């Protein structure tokens, strides 16, 4: 009986289902045509589900035999040889750094709108994110471009950038040059989260007006300077250094004029036509490079040898332009040596541990322009300088060394920073 009951219930359920489903009747008249839907988004889209432009074909870019427009394969090879492509410091993935050092952080900033970023002196603000990115990736193609969505390699954003200053008495500048350079400067700018001014204790803010004997500068860090990536941008705009009064006026070279009128930008020099191989120009961003098998640096000056700039400039030599570079290298070394001379520095600094100390240390045995000069300071043993404005000479040394062009970005401004600092310390 139990067996029959089970089968009876199963049959009853089947009849019930037929009752609810019923039989399919004849089709009704066709309804009106609906609106055309948006393009679908493939879950395998290469970047953040941005989607694909209509009619885009993979081989347009991803087949070296057919891609004669964008040359993506070549640019990928160049990028692998760049500092960006090496993934330099993409481990800096916290919310204050990821916005420039990681692909994901930069995209967050782009998505929110760069114009919404705010900067406050002495406060952790600026190019930062709302979150950390523990599984971040290095900046890459999709950091700067949206080729699948747009069907081209235009830069993501080309709006102007406010370049803030950390030096007392200076005002913010605006970088608004070529389209691509405006994107570069989204990251290559001073950063308000610079450790010297947000850590505890805070180092003294550089200020050339603090000339009284009672004005004291206390420096608690070896790297008392602008954020490194912002040095070239400020130098090109003729700002960011401590402008100590002296015999040289703070004027700009013609590079700065071209930047300000929007006819010159970073890619003109740093993405010039490749000279040979994949170690310079293009997406390597390198002007200076080591040729294969060489131990001496070579230079790609294809961006210089154009009409209206420096036609005929050799990749090395003794002409006026290379002479300017040599002058700046010598001035960097001269200023560094003065700061290591305790007979000079003891006149304006309080002794550490009861004795006069140099203001800087150098990390290489040969004192040349490429040496790394570090402030002889720490949180437990600060460098104390009076009157405070003379500490600006140390700020200028670090600005010029981290700027790395040896004056080529803005020769006149850099020379004035160095020479007036040297003259002030020799008094």
Image (spheres, rainbow, N blue to C red):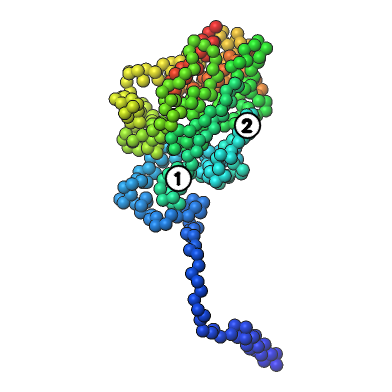
Binning the other alpha carbons within 10 Å of mark 1 as few (below 14), some (14 to 19) or many (20 upward) gives some
Q: Position of residue 177 (x, y in %)?
A: 45, 33
Q: Which quadrant would residue 325 be assigned to in this image?
A: top left
Secondary structure beneath dot 2 equals loop
Counting the numbered discs, the total is 2
Q: Nearer the viewer, residue 379 or 182?
A: 182
**In this picture, is 356 found above or below 137?**
above
Secondary structure beneath dot 1 equals loop
Q: Which quadrant would residue 374 be assigned to in this image?
A: top right
**In this picture, is 84 found above or below 310?**
below
Q: Position of residue 257 (x, y in %)?
A: 43, 25
Question: Which residue is label 1 attached to?
Answer: 145
CB atoms of marks 1 and 2 within 8 Å: no
Question: Which residue is label 2 attached to?
Answer: 120
Disc marking residue 273? none
Classify the position of the C terminus by image quarter.
Answer: top right
Q: Position of residue 337 (x, y in %)?
A: 50, 14
Q: Which quadrant would residue 10 be assigned to in this image?
A: bottom right
Classify the position of the N terminus by image quarter.
Answer: bottom right
Mark-to-mark CA distance, 1 and 2: 29 Å
The answer to whether residue 264 is left or right of residue 101 is left
**In this picture, is 22 found above or below 125?**
below
Binning the other alpha carbons within 10 Å of mark 2 as few (below 14), some (14 to 19) or many (20 upward) gives few
Question: What residue is shown at x 35% (from left), y 38% (from top)?
Answer: 278
Question: What residue is shown at x 64% (from left), y 19% (from top)?
Answer: 218
Question: What residue is shown at x 66% (from left), y 22% (from top)?
Answer: 380
Q: Residue furthest left?
A: 312
Can residue 87 be spotted in the picture? no
The answer to whether residue 94 is left or right of residue 188 is right
The answer to whether residue 382 is left or right of residue 42 is right
Q: Position of residue 58 (x, y in %)?
A: 38, 54
């Amino acid at each position: 009986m139990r067996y029959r009951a089970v089968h009876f219930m199963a049959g009853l359920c089947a009849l019930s289902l037929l009752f609810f489903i019923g039989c399919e009747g004849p089709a009704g008249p066709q309804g009106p045509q609906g609106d055309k839907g948006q393009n679908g988004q493939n879950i395998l889209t290469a970047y953040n589900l941005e989607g694909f432009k209509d009619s885009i074909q993979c081989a347009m870019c991803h087949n070296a035999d057919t891609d004669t427009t964008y040359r993506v394969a070549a640019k990928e090879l160049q990028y692998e040889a760049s500092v960006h492509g090496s993934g330099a410091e993409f481990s800096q993935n916290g919310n204050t750094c990821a916005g420039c050092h990681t692909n994901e952080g930069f995209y967050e900033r782009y998505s929110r709108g760069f114009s919404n970023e705010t900067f406050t002196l002495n406060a952790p603000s600026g190019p930062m994110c709302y979150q950390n990115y523990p599984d971040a990736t290095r900046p890459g193609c999709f950091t700067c471009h949206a080729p699948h969505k747009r069907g081209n390699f235009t830069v993501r954003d080309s709006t102007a950038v406010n370049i803030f200053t950390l030096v007392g008495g200076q005002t913010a500048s605006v970088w608004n040059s070529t389209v691509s350079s405006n994107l570069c400067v989204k990251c290559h700018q001073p950063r308000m989260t610079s450790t010297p001014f947000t850590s505890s204790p805070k180092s003294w803010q550089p200020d050339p007006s603090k000339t009284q004997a009672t004005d004291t500068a206390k420096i608690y860090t070896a790297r008392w300077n602008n954020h490194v990536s912002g040095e070239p941008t400020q130098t090109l705009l003729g700002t960011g250094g401590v402008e100590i009064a002296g015999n040289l006026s703070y004027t700009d070279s013609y590079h700065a004029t071209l930047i300000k009128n929007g006819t010159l930008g970073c890619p003109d020099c740093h993405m010039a036509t490749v000279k040979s191989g994949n170690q310079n120009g293009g997406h390597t961003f390198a002007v200076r490079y080591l040729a294969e098998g060489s131990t001496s640096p070579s230079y790609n000056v294809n961006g210089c040898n154009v009409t209206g700039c420096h036609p005929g400039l050799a990749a090395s030599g003794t002409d006026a332009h290379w002479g300017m570079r040599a002058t700046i290298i010598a001035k960097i070394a001269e200023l560094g040596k003065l700061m290591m001379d305790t007979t000079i520095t003891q006149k304006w600094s309080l002794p550490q541990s009861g004795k006069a100390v140099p203001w800087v240390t150098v990390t290489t045995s040969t004192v040349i322009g490429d040496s790394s000069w570090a402030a002889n300071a720490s949180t437990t043993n600060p460098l104390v300088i009076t009157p405070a404005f003379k500490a600006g000479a140390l700020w200028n040394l670090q600005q010029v060394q981290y700027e790395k062009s040896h004056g080529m970005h803005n020769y006149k401004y850099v020379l004035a920073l160095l020479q007036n600092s040297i003259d002030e310390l020799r008094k």
